[in-house]
Image (tube, helix red, strand yellow):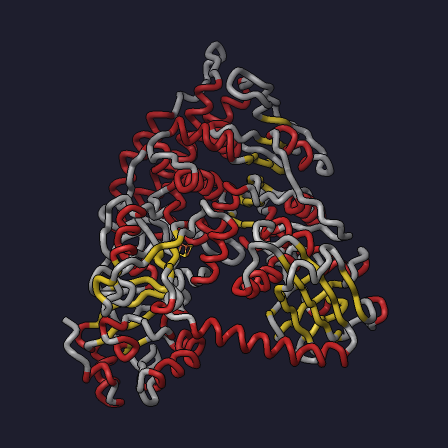
Amino acid sequence: MSKIICTAAIRGAHKIVKRAEDKLNETITKKGKDHQVEFPNTAYFFPIIYSMTGMEVKTLAEFQPVLERAKGLLPPIPSDKHWLPYLGHALDAGMATLFAEEIIEACKYLIGPDPVDGIWLGAADDVILRERGIEFVDGTAPGFAAIVGAAPDADTAVKIARELQQKNLYVFMSAETNGVSFAEQLDSKGVQLGWETRLVPFGKDISATIYALGFANRAAMSFGAVKPGDFRHNLLYNKARIFAFVMALGKVDDEKYANAAGAINYGFPTIADTDIPEILPTGVCTYEHVVSRIPHDKIVEKAIEVRGLKVSIHKIDIPVPYGPAFEGERIRKDDMYVELGGPKAHGFEFVTMKDISEIEDGKIELLGPDLKEFEEGSSINIGIYVAVAGRKMQKDFEPILERQIHRFLGEAQGIFHMGQRNQIRHRISTEGYKLGLRLEHIGTILHAKFHEEYGAIVDKVQITIYTKEPEVEKLLGGVHQAFVERDERIMGMKDNTVNLFYSCTLCQSFAPTHVCVISPERSGLCGSVSWLDAKASFEITPTGPNQPIEKGDVIDEGTGQWDGVNKFLTDASNRKFEKVSMYSMLVDPMTSCGCFECISVLLPMCNGIMTVHRDFTEMTPCGMKFSTLAGSVGGGQQTPGFVGHSKLFLASNKFISADGGLARLVWMPKELKEEMGHLIETTAKELGLEDFLSKIADETIATTEEEVLNHLQKVNHPALELNALI
Ligand code: SF4
Ligand code: ZN
């Protein structure tokens, strides 16, 4: 490393470590040294500190030894011109910087300024890690660009961001240049920010840069089997597997140098647009550490070249950019060319299985007028009819394939996919239309993507698109009938009519003992894996996270225990747990990872339970908020009296049936009641509970257990009649 950079990085590290010390002292003074500290909804302590040192920081006091360690790493500031620091000094200074910044950000969560503010998102929680981290491992996202600072103007920022999105890279943003940040520049141009678009604004402070590196560390621990404290393995994993780089835009000050030095530890180089001394390859890296003076129209290309990234984009032959980064993009009314379906026109999308001899692979037909024959702003009648065939295809997989249309079409820039089945309301943007996007491209996309992702079950895909009103209307009848039959068939699937349940162990990546046992009447606790989904996923990837479980002999019909299921759990949880009840939250409840849509908790005084969902952030009658509950229930544990589950499970006949079932439910947030009310009411009727929904309290009625009890007595809630719970 050149002397100038080393000196600046070491100076920067000293400043940041000092800042961390002051911030920690201030926080301890205000909150006390034993105060708990964490990034919200995470089970991984502080990712950089934990992965590098193995230190499990849970309280402010436990930051003290980390701070000492950071100080110990700091080389003296080179003032003597005869003393020449070498790369190792700067790397140590870089590491000290990252530890210190994690302390600073953690303290901010306790005494402010809140890292989550306006466009700024702060730390990624465990659910985001599961959803997004896996993309770094399966290659959907090859890596990330950590942008530090700001572009010279907002238009340049947009150009750089779009280019990175098209390469499927995540863009993590932090810090500022002259008071302006890259994220604010994008925001000022109306660019949609967030995890959905892969444009992630972490924070305006330089210390927010650790969220990007922390994310990489957590992915390494979760998906790369890197052990906490094994810093060597961690760094090697990141260097080899996570294709990341720092893009420093605008003036690089001491603090930014210090962060760049931290990133170099990971093998992440820094690419800058300004004139800073370059660092050419040494024995440590096979590529440059710092490359400077790169013009903005070349900077993305250069970064990718320097980091040696192989971007593999499956080319789909359409005139607009395509990729996961565009999936979350919304098209507003002002930007839309036409609406497909929606309130003013008929529309449907439908996947149906045909015999392999009946269809022709790759045949795409448009029957009716195309976009150019419609006026701008109009609503078009549309039928998207997809016929699939394959030796391993099953009728049951139709809805699963159909659900993918949302993602497949949404990933095209210029198409906004909303709704499903015969309730669709898609939009084509004016920009997309101008680029040449036409209705046949819907077929092009679906054909390519079904083959690419579902090639294991689908051999042929044929797409017909209808746009004449009478034809669409006529087809709708048959399609609607098919949906009704499909629903009846799925509703008819019961736990006792199948021999196989399925597992999901995807979340073992961060909750190593967690096993979701998925049955027709109990979906995975994240709500995104039904029994059919798991079955199809097993057909597609026989060695994947969804494995068939032979139920075996009944051990206890009431609690829902089978010897085959127990045996599976024993193996899959690494012998941590040996028994699981499908229908009880009191006796051997299912393990909870961290992704549960809801948590149910015993309310002893009420002889019932309460259920709270993730979006409800206020206090609940059990005396804990969702986030606190999630912290104590999650992580792959069995916690009798508590259980994480999907929203849909509330409407299952089997919902805690061993503990009294739905009749035990005495409190839930109003929002959840409104969302699930219809289904709950139907199930309640089946169970012989009259007028049940109105008897459940919510936060507008009761916020403490006593108030809930009062309400129960007033409305004569059936829970009061049930056997004593404990
Ligand atoms: Fe995780 Fe269970 Fe959802 Fe699978 S089904 S992703 S294990 S929560
Ligand atoms: Zn999970």
> Relative to 492, is 691 on the left or the right?
left
State whether residue 345 appears in this view: no
Q: Toward which corner of the image does residue 327 lie, by quadrant?
A: bottom right
Where is residue 523, by image quadrant? bottom left
Q: What residue do we see at 37% from left, 59% from top?
A: 501
Q: Quadrant of residue 460?
A: bottom right
Outermost residue to the top: 82
Q: Quadrant of ligand 1?
A: bottom left
Q: Is residue 62 above or below residue 411?
A: above
- The quadrant the C terminus occupies is bottom left
Q: Is residue 478 above or below residue 188?
A: below
Q: Which one is in front, 360 or 447?
A: 360
In the image, farthest residue toward the front:
357
Picture residue at 24% right of the left edge, 76% below the top: 660
Residue 404 position, x and y percent, is 58, 60
Of residues 437 and 405, the one drawn nearer to the viewer in this rendering:
405
> Do we see residue 250 in this rendering?
yes
285 to the left or right of 293: left
Query: How many marks do you count on the picture?
Result: 0
User: How far across and down, in percent of the image, does residue 313 sit?
Assistant: 66, 42
Residue 282 percent location from the top left of the image: 55, 16
> Which one is in front, 94 or 7?
94
Q: Residue at x 71, y 80 (%)?
A: 473
The structure residue drawn at horizontal position 59% and vertical position 79%, both measured from the top left corner, is 481
Q: Is residue 695 above or below residue 533?
A: below
Image coords of residue 386 (percent x, y) = 67, 64
